[in-house]
Image (spheres, rainbow, N blue to C red):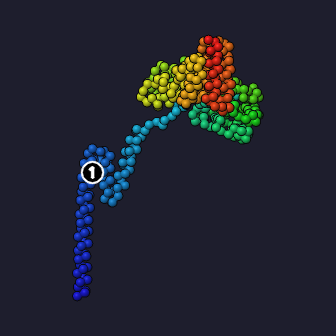
Amino acid sequence: MDVCKHFLKAVAAKMTSDVSSLIVRLAGIWRVLLWEFVFSLNARTNPILKSSGGENMQAFLKGSTQGVKPQRDKATASSSGENKRQKPVPWVEKYRPKCVDEVAFQEEVVAVLKKSLEGADLPNLLFYGPPGTGKTSTILAAARELYGPELYRQRVLELNASDERGIQVIREKVKNFAQLTVAGTRTDGKSCPPFKIIILDEADSMTGAAQAALRRTMEKESRTTRFCLICNYVSRIIEPLTSRCSKFRFKPLANEVQQERLLEICTKENLKYSKEGIDALVKVSEGDLRKAITLLQSTARFSAEKEITESIVVEIAGVVPPKVIENLLQTCYKGNFEKLEVAVKNLVDEGYAATQILSQFHDVIIEEKLGDKQKSVITEKMAVVDKCLVDGADEYLQLLNLCSVIMQQATQSA
């Protein structure tokens, strides 16, 4: 009896497994038929599925959906490639001059450099002047014209204030680069000068020992290397170096030149602007075109689709509104010290920098209808206050001190 029971259980289990396997097979067939139907419908509207429907179906029948993914990835990649945008670049770099002719307002420097480029005979150079006037852009543009885009990286060594430029760097890195000899032809077959260019930006921050170590290298490697020193203050360069270089002074850019360049950028970037807004940018930058372009980009991002106006420029630049300066000056003229104290405290509480207030005060005082003696006393006090602020004195007390002197001189002249 036990054997019969075991036999019947085995037959029942076999029949159950056969039925379940049959159900699984029927379900698989239905899945295949359903997928074929879906692919046939999609292939009519989607050419990618139409061209690869057989491969995808084979992959599905094998139990894998990997065959579908490459086509989908390929389609996504193609669409993303079409919609790929250019990487955002600061406008200062985007609109940096690519050749010497594009340098603005420095006619003498451009004329000399063009003659040197024509003869491929470049002397050691010393560029000095205020920031943002095109010193670095000029030598970089000249180097690109000389060597082309391929040889530029091999022939030009640029070091600025962020690099180590002590005496050890001059003896090793600069000296080793200067000793390398180069050919007189470019990869495109054009001729180029058989020397390299070493650009030392902000050279006035170099130590005296490093400048002294540079003298011998400039003389010894004159056949294979040219040096270009760039600085804001030529008085901080030692005399032996200045005597070995052709000196060029870069002037602050005229207002008309800045306006022309800013309007050109506004046109290319499709910006809405007002004449007062552009004038405010020029006034705030004080001849520094780099500062003007940076402020223009910041203002454009801040105003979005709105028009660039004078008020937005003043707010972005951190300049004290002219009306605030005028109100403080009128308070000084009234001769009431209590009101003056409150006005100065409110001005400091607003967060305006004391040095910025001092700078704008100076421009206003020069134009005021005061006597020469009164103006000289006030401007002398401004110099003392500026020195105290640099040394870390309290802004409120120093501004109150200056305003009290203005009030005293104004009441005397009245």
Q: Position of residue 8 (x, y in %)?
A: 22, 81
The residue lying toward the viewer, choosing from 10 and 129, is 129
Q: Is residue 164 visible?
A: yes
Left or right side of 153 for 71: left
Query: With respect to residue 58, does 188 lie above or below?
Result: above
Q: Is residue 13 left or right of residue 275?
A: left
Residue 115 image offset from top left, x and y in percent:
64, 22
Name the residue nearer the viewer: 184 or 363.
363
Which residue carries the number 1 mark? 39
Instruction: Say which residue appears at 57% left-offset and 17% top-offset.
Output: 334
* Amino acid marked by disc 1: Phe
Establish if 186 lies above or below 400.
below
The N terminus: image quadrant: bottom left
Task: Identify the image quadrant of the C terminus.
Answer: top right
What residue appears at the point 32 percent right and 57 percent down from the top-left corner? 60
Q: In the drawing, does residue 297 fall left or right of residue 218?
A: left
Relative image position of residue 215 (x, y in whole percent): 75, 32
Please say whether residue 190 is visible from this viewpoint: no
Q: Residue 282 occupies which quadrant of the picture? A: top right
Q: Please identify the quarter of the rendering in which residue 168 is found.
A: top right
- Disc 1 residue crowd, few under 14, some 14–19, many 20+, Cα 10 Å: some
- Residue 134 against residue 86 in the figure, above or below: above
Residue drawn at the location 62% of the way across and 18% of the way down: 407
In this view, the residue in front, 395 or 220, is: 395
- Asked where in the image residue 223 lies, by quadrant, the reply is top right
Residue in the picture at 40% in, 38% down: 83
Image x and y of residue 310, in percent? 49, 22
238 with respect to 264 (left or right): right
